[in-house]
Amino acid sequence: MSIKTEARKTGQPLVGPPAGDRALDYGSALNEAFLQLMERDPTMVLIGQGLYSPWYVGNSMVKLEERFGKERVIDCPVSESAMTGVAIGLALAGVRAVMVHPRMDFMVYATDPIFNQAAKAHYMFAGQVNVPVVIRGIINRGNEQAAQHAQALQSIYMHQPGLKVVMPATPYDAKGLLIASVRDDNPVIFIDDRWLYSQVAPVPEDFYVVPLGKGAVLRPGSDVTVVATSYMTVEALSAAEQLAGSGVSVEVIDPRTLKPLDEELIYSSVEKTGRLVVADAAFPTCGAASEIAALAAEHAFSSLKAPIQRVTLPDAPAPCSTSLEEVYFPKAENIVLAIQRTLKP
Amino acid sequence: MTETLSGDSALWRAMYRAMLRIRRFEEAIGDCVESGEIIGPAHLYIGEEAVATGVCLALRRDDFIFGAHRSHGHYLAKGGDMAALAAEIFGKATGCSEGRGGSMHIIARDVGLLGTSALVGGGFGPGVGTALASRLQGRDRVTAIFFGDGATEEGIFFEALNFAALHHLPVIFVCENNGYSSHLRIQERQPIDTLYEHAAVYRIPSIRVDGNDVRAVHQTGLEAVDRARKDQGPTFIEAMTYRWRGHVGPKLDLDVGLRTREELDSWIARCPIENLANFMDEVGAWNPGERQAIDREVAQEVATAIGFARQSPRPDPSELLWHVYQD
Ligand SMILES: Cc1ncc(C[n+]2csc(CCOP(=O)(O)OP(=O)(O)O)c2C)c(N)n1
Ligand SMILES: [Mg+2]
């Protein structure tokens, strides 16, 4: 089986996939990746709540059950902990499995098998076993769903040695990173965001990978670096566009994988711009933004002309009422303000 | 009319009113979801009214109840304020959770509802905990935990049963078996559909009851409460019922191939409210004009609650960070 590896190298601007590819929305790009993975690996299994549902997981899982049957596409009981353990067991026994949690909030029930087993097995048993499982958590928030239907928990998985954490922002990366995640020999937490599902962009029909650990420059610039995760890339690009009018050139970087993190890409950008804003729509304390800011402070301190700024959620659970949601979820406007703070003399 | 029958007819009237309040309230909420006035997800209890009503009418005001994502009915049946519930579902500052929680996070402390968690199975641990607290505090208060058939698939269900049985705690597990968890029928999720058997393993007295027969649920509830109150341990009640509307919101979920019109109709024919009203007709339990009067009063109460919710303000954005910690 041949697989095309993305040609881009660290530090090179990414302008999207080769021209001429048909456009797909984010969910369809994931769906196509699942389809192609399942076709190529006849033992691969998908497990999760809502896989047969018309509304649970957007359009990302449609037609898979029809195509591959209920033995390989398993819509499961409301048993997050056990089912995640089952996916890990499949992986231990050599079956590639993707465990789908339709919301990250529900995935909290599955923290034990993920933290204590998947993340540590390879280490504890001196490399004799490995756990090539993908655990997909979907961020689904807003619309007055309130505190338990809102969370973006990437940082708790980053915190665990042994896990990889992937957060694609574009349809192209969604497909390529999902394929790379399934093919990786380690447990990978793959996080997508329902707010990205309306993104439409060219996606090659090929079976291709976007390598884990390689970030991308979404927009080149020279005055300020904005590192934005997942959906925040959309807001960051909009902030960059707004500021371009007033003569501020913003470079937007999408790490794509939070662990391993493409540190070199971030440092080299900061060396160029001297200013850093990190945008991650999650809780601030010990968050992805904190980690990236700390790394940049350690490794690119001499290039920094201003304090690093973080754009995150406030340190509070998500509210219900739209009047509070409005001010809770960070937007382009918050990134603009953060950029302006780095530009203050 | 004998003494007992007139005593009972007061109870039946109370049951009728309690169920109708839930029905009319949920219908109005469904309409407001349809019209876009309510933004957040609302899981409606229409069709299942007899379960909350039968159990809650067997409880004392200071007894605790726990629910989950589909708990408007539990809140109302236990005596929570209707206007505050409506306002909460509308995301308003006057709501029972001041617009912070919405439909899935409702609270009525004054009547023993300490707040609902929307994670399936979320009521088990805290529910059993309050029962232990009642024991430790030397109070004869009991706790009823309402949960769906889906919740019996979470590991914590078994963990909670075990601990409650081990310490014979004053707790009543009320399983609302409506045959579905979201889009999946129970047959697609469990090898058995006799959920009361789960509890029997822990030697917890367990019983299956027609969840659309409010008198039967109530009788079962009374026995369970009595046992708990006398410190004789937990009871498990499996109430067989059905939700008329879809998993979430006012739609029926018929168009998406999840269930059949015939199945829905067969349950509508067993409407818990009509069931009771017909029975009361048969035994002559209504005074003249009484049913109509209750219907009017309930319609008025619901209209007032929805009006209150509609007119109430949303929380002020400056209050975003309130309540993260107790000061
Ligand atoms: C831990 C967890 N997993 C999944 C969900 C999504 N979910 C919400 S309601 C529901 C169905 C639960 O079914 P059941 O317990 O039977 O209650 P019903 O909706 O039928 O009243 C599911 C799966 C959730 N809220 N929490
Ligand atoms: Mg159910």
Image (spheres, helix red, strand yellow):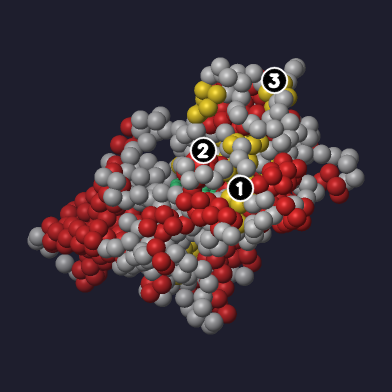
* Placement of A42 over or under B302, stated as above or below: above
Report the disc number at residue A224. 1
Of discs 3 and 2, which sits in the foreground? Answer: 2
Q: Is residue A208 left or right of residue A324?
A: right
The kind of residue on which mark 3 rests is: Arg
The kind of residue on which mark 1 rests is: Val
* Placement of A324 over or under A180, stated as above or below: below
Name the quadrant of the N terminus of chain B. bottom left
Q: Which of A258 and A98 is in front in this view?
A: A258
Looking at the image, which residue is at 55% across and 52% down?
A339
- The local secondary structure at tag 3 comes to helix
Same chain shared by disc 2 and disc 1: yes
- The local secondary structure at tag 1 comes to strand
The kind of residue on which mark 2 rests is: Leu
Same chain shared by disc 3 and disc 2: yes
* Placement of A286 over or under A253, stated as above or below: below
- Whether residue A261 is visible here, answered yes or no, is no
| The image quarter in which residue B96 lies | bottom left
Quote the CA–CA distance across marks 3 and 1. 43 Å
Badge 2: chain ID: A
Residue identifier under label 3: A40
Looking at the image, which residue is at 25% across and 58% down?
B310
Q: Position of residue B227 (x, y in %)?
A: 49, 70
Residue identifier under label 2: A196
Task: Give whichever of discs 3 and 2 has the lower sequence position.
Answer: 3
Badge 1: chain ID: A
Report the disc number at residue B282. none
Q: Nearer the viewer, residue A19 or B107?
A: A19
Task: Give whichever of discs 2 and 1 has the lower sequence position.
Answer: 2
Looking at the image, which residue is at 61% across and 24% down?
A17
Of discs 2 and 1, which sits in the foreground? Answer: 1
Q: Position of residue A13 (x, y in %)?
A: 65, 33
